[in-house]
Amino acid sequence: MTDGPYSISRNPLYLFSLVGIAGIGAQIGSVLAIVVLVFAAYLAFDMAIRGEEKYLRKRHENSFADYSGSTPRLWPDLSLWRESDNLPLRSASAMRSLRDGMVFLGAWAAVEMIKLAQSLGVLPILWTLPI
């Protein structure tokens, strides 16, 4: 797939996952949490991307070399956008993506429950960050 989001970034899912993870850090209310969570996720994603690229280079050789030479690895270049008239959408894939995104909703709910428990005195606040 080289059209749509894959025309501006080779890894749009990881990119937008980092945005979502930054949002989780923002929900915590700490700039430090944002930085730590995004950095930790970036390290994990970087390892995954390296493994995926190794596989793709081996499987698709020249076509992946051309694609990786013209499309940014993570940070998007919006000027490269290519639309596809034949982009298939399968309900199973869409449902899997929706299910994967539920992790962020679950993280939000967990943060809100922790904050509620702390405000009620049920869960102690062990330390606070100065930021």
Image (cartoon, helix red, strand yellow):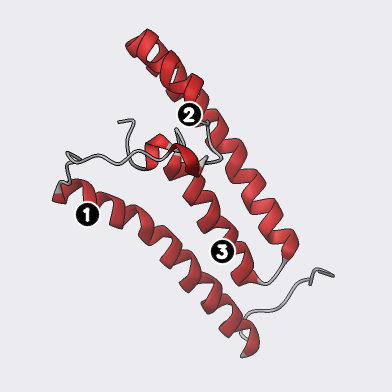
Which secondary structure lies at badge 1? helix
Q: Is residue 67 above or below residue 18?
A: above
Q: Position of residue 30 (x, y in %)?
A: 72, 67
Instruction: Give the distance between the C-alpha atoms of the residues marked 1 and 3, in whole angstroms.
Output: 22 Å
**Dots 2 and 1: beta carbons under 8 Å?**
no
In the picture as drawn, the residue positioned furthest to the bottom comes out as 120
- Three-letter residue code for mark 2: Thr
Residue type of the residue flagged with mark 1: Met
Residue located at (54% from left, 50% from top): 18
Q: Residue at x 46, y 16 (%)?
A: 54
Residue identifier under label 3:
24
Q: Which of the 4 image quarters holds residue 59?
A: top left
Compared with 35, 107 (above or below) is: below
Query: Looking at the picture, how far across and down is residue 41, in whole percent?
Result: 58, 45
- Image coordinates of residue 96 in percent, x first then y, are 25, 50
- Give the secondary structure at mark 2: loop
Looking at the rendered structure, the kind of residue marked 3 is Ile
Residue at left offset 62%, top offset 63%? 25
Sort mark 2 into few (<14), some (14-19) or many (20+) by Cα contacts within 10 Å.
many
Tell me the residue that label 2 is attached to.
71
Instruction: Calculate the distance from the C-alpha at mark 3 to the C-alpha at mark 2.
Output: 28 Å
Please state which of residues 4 and 29 is positioned toward the viewer in this rendering.
4
Q: Nearer the viewer, mark 3 or mark 2?
A: 2
**Outermost front residue:** 79
Q: Looking at the image, tell me whether mark 3 or mark 2 is earlier in sequence order.
A: 3
Looking at marks 2 and 1 on the same chain, the residue that comes earlier in the sequence is marked by 2
Tell me: 47 left or right of 7. Answer: right
Front position in the image: 3 or 98: 3
Q: Which mark is residue 33?
A: none
Quickly name the residue at label 1.
95
